[in-house]
Amino acid sequence: MDENKNGSIDEQTEGAFHQSLKRNNKQIRDDRATAIVEDAELKYRRKIEDLQMSIKKMKREQDGMIDLSPTNATSLVLASDFDSEKYVISDLDLGIKIRNSEISLEIAEKRFEFLFGKK
């Protein structure tokens, strides 16, 4: 360890640990704030992407419910095999899930823009 005539560590040979200990309160707060913002921004962005993907999947599933050809493009479901009550319940439940997810996505996107100033 290099010491000058006063017995203190030479500033040119200070390591990261020593420099970190000498940081002032503002520098420490800035570093902590940056870490918190980066973490929250990534989590928000991920949540928005997850909601977008979920909505796409549910819409595809709902569109797929219209296809009543079980085996190939030329075959159809017989009227006696079609359970209209089950179809209606499934379609409406899926529609409600889609709408709730769209509302959640809209809120998340607005909050993200407000909190992080980005779209």
Image (spheres, helix red, strand yellow):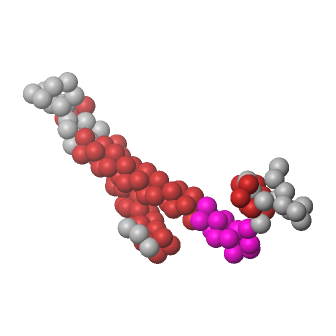
The magenta segment is 23-36
Q: Is residue 90 left or right of residue 69?
A: right
Between 111 and 24, which is closer to the camera in this rendering?
A: 24
Rendered image quadrant of residue 35: bottom right
Question: Residue at (9%, 27%) from the top-left corner?
Answer: 74
Q: Is residue 38 left or right of residue 56?
A: right
Between 53 and 32, which is closer to the camera in this rendering?
A: 32
Instruction: Tell me how many marks there are.
Output: 0
Name the chief secondary structure element in magenta: helix
Question: Residue at (18%, 31%) from the top-left corner?
Answer: 69
The image position of residue 38, as x and y in percent, is 55, 61
Rendered image quadrant of residue 95: bottom left
Q: Is residue 45 left or right of residue 88?
A: right
Rendered image quadrant of residue 3: bottom right
Question: Residue at (41%, 69%) from the top-left corner?
Answer: 118
**Residue 65 appears in view:** yes
Residue 66 falls within the magenta-colored stretch = no
The image position of residue 9, as x and y in percent, is 82, 59
Farthest-out residue, left: 74
Quadrant in which the C terminus appears:
bottom left
Above or below: residue 91 compared with residue 115 = above
The image position of residue 8, as x and y in percent, is 86, 62
